[in-house]
C-alpha cells in the first residue's frame, strides 16, 4: 500500500510518496496551484495517484503554535476535502508545525543550496518530512 504525503501551500503543493512497505518517504515533485482560478493541481495529482498506485493521503495540518486551527490549517483541510471527494481515497491529517522551517534549516545547513533552489524544493522536502513522520508513528503503533 502506497501513501501520498502532501504539503499544501498557498501557491504550491509538495508531493511525496511512500515505498510499498510504508517504511520510507520519497519526494516526487511540487505542483503549482492557483486558488483564485480554482486550479488546484488535481489533474496532475490524479496522474501521480495512478502512476504510484496510491491508496491514501496524508496531508500536513499547519496548526498554530498553541495547537489551534488557523486559516492555513483550514485551507489544508479544504484541500483534503477536495481530494477525498474527487478521488474517493482516505485522507489523514497530521500536525506539521515547523516542518517547513525544519526543511529550510536542513537545506541551509547543507550549504550548497541557493535561496532560489531552496524555494523550488522546500515544499517537496516538507511533504517528505510530513509523510515520514506519519510512517514512523504508524510503525511504532
Image (cartoon, grey):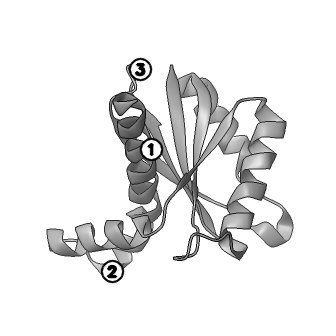
Which structural element holds mark 2?
helix
Residue sitting at x 42%, y 32%: 138
Using a 10 Å C-alpha cutoff, classify the residue at mark 1 as few (fewer than 14 neighbours), some (14 to 19) or many (20 or more).
many
Residue 43, placed above or below residue 55:
below
Q: Is residue 40 visible?
A: no
Q: Quadrant of residue 63?
A: bottom right
Quick check: 91 left or right of 6?
A: right
Residue picked out by circle 2? 115
Q: On the image, numbered disc 1 is attached to which residue?
A: 131
Residue 20 lies left or right of residue 92; in this view the side is left
Residue position for label 3: 20
Closest to the observer, 84 or 93: 93
Q: Position of residue 49 (x, y in %)?
A: 62, 30
Q: Is residue 42 left or right of residue 22?
A: right
Sequence order check, earlier mark of 1 and 2: 2
Residue 24 horizontal/vertical position (percent): 33, 34
Q: Which of 130 and 117 lies nearest the eye of the viewer?
A: 130
- Graded by Cα atoms within 10 Å as few (under 14), some (14 to 19) or many (20 or more), the crowding at tag 3 reads few
Q: Are marks 1 and 2 in contact (CB under 8 Å)?
A: no
Secondary structure of residue under mark 1: helix
Q: Nearer the viewer, mark 1 or mark 2?
A: 1
> Label 1, label 3: how many angstroms apart (C-alpha)?
13 Å
Q: Earlier in the sequence, mark 3 or mark 2?
A: 3
Q: Are marks 3 and 2 in contact (CB under 8 Å)?
A: no
Amino acid at each position: 500500500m502506497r501513501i501520498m504525503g502532501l504539503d499544501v501551500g498557498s501557491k504550491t503543493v509538495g508531493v511525496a510518496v511512500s515505498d510499498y512497505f510504508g517504511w520510507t518517504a520519497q519526494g516526487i515533485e511540487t505542483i503549482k496551484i492557483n486558488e483564485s482560478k480554482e486550479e488546484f493541481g488535481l489533474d496532475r495529482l490524479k496522474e501521480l495517484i495512478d502512476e504510484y498506485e496510491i491508496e491514501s493521503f496524508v496531508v500536513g495540518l499547519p496548526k498554530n503554535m498553541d495547537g489551534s486551527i488557523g486559516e492555513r490549517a483550514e485551507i489544508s483541510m479544504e484541500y483534503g476535502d477536495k481530494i477525498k471527494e474527487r478521488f474517493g481515497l482516505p485522507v489523514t491529517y497530521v500536525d506539521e508545525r515547523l516542518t517547513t522551517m525544519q526543511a529550510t534549516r536542513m537545506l541551509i545547513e547543507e550549504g550548497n543550496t541557493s535561496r532560489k533552489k531552496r524555494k523550488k524544493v522546500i515544499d517537496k522536502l516538507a511533504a517528505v518530512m510530513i509523510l515520514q513522520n506519519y510512517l514512523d508513528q504508524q510503525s511504532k503503533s
